[in-house]
Image: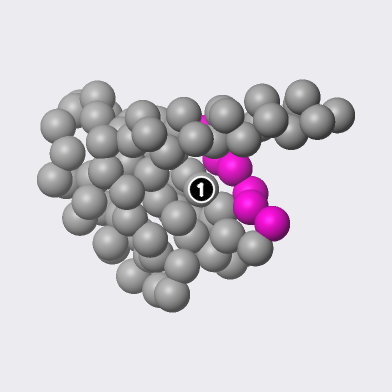
């Protein structure tokens, strides 16, 4: 069990390190959650990744859905013990 936990932590750390940019929208409400995400994605080159830290059911539904609708890819999602989630997006284009 400790090995699995360590592997999970290693995977999360790799995800954090691999992101080209990171934003924290945990204090924002919809629709600002995706507005800020979209601005950050617009500043990336196609293929680059954005790690989004968010909180709440509504942003967790809307941010990935809207990103996908706009041609981006959700690569990974990790729910943390503090109630936040990490979402790794790859810019389309």
Q: Residue at x 28, y 61 (%)?
A: 36
Q: Secondary structure at mark 1?
A: strand
When the figure is inspected, residue 45 is found, relative to residue 42, above or below; the finding is above
Q: Is residue 79 magenta?
A: yes
Q: Is residue 71 visible?
A: no
The picture quadrant where one finds residue 7 is: top right
**Residue 31 at what x, y percent from top left?**
38, 69
Q: Residue at x 59, y 43 (%)?
A: 78
Quadrant occupied by the C terminus: top left
Q: How is the image coloured?
A: one colour
Residue corresponding to mark 1: 86
Q: Is residue 70 magenta?
A: no
How many badges with numbers are in the image?
A: 1
**Residue 87 at what x, y percent from top left?**
48, 44
Question: In terms of secondary structure, what is the magenta stretch mainly?
Answer: strand
When the figure is inspected, residue 67 is found, relative to residue 34, above or below; the finding is above
Q: Is residue 34 visible?
A: yes
Is disc 1 surrounded by few (<14), some (14 to 19) or many (20+) residues within 10 Å? Answer: many
- Indicate left or right for 17 with 4 as reference: left
Quadrant occupied by the N terminus: top right
Q: Residue at x 22, y 51 (%)?
A: 40
**Residue 82 at what x, y percent from top left?**
65, 63
Q: Front-most of 72 and 15? A: 15
Q: Front-most of 45 and 82? A: 82
Q: Front-most of 41 and 67? A: 41
Q: Residue at x 38, y 61 (%)?
A: 24
Segment tinted magenta in the rendering = 76-81
């Amino acid at each position: 069990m400790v090995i699995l936990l360590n592997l999970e932590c290693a995977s999360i750390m790799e995800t954090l390190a691999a992101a080209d940019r990171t934003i924290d929208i945990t204090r924002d409400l919809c629709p600002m959650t995706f507005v800020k995400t979209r601005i950050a994605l617009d500043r990336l080159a196609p293929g680059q990744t954005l790690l989004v830290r968010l909180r709440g059911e509504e942003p967790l539904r809307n941010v990935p859905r809207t990103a996908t609708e706009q041609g981006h890819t959700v690569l990974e999602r990790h729910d943390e013990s503090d109630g936040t989630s990490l979402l790794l997006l790859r810019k389309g284009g």
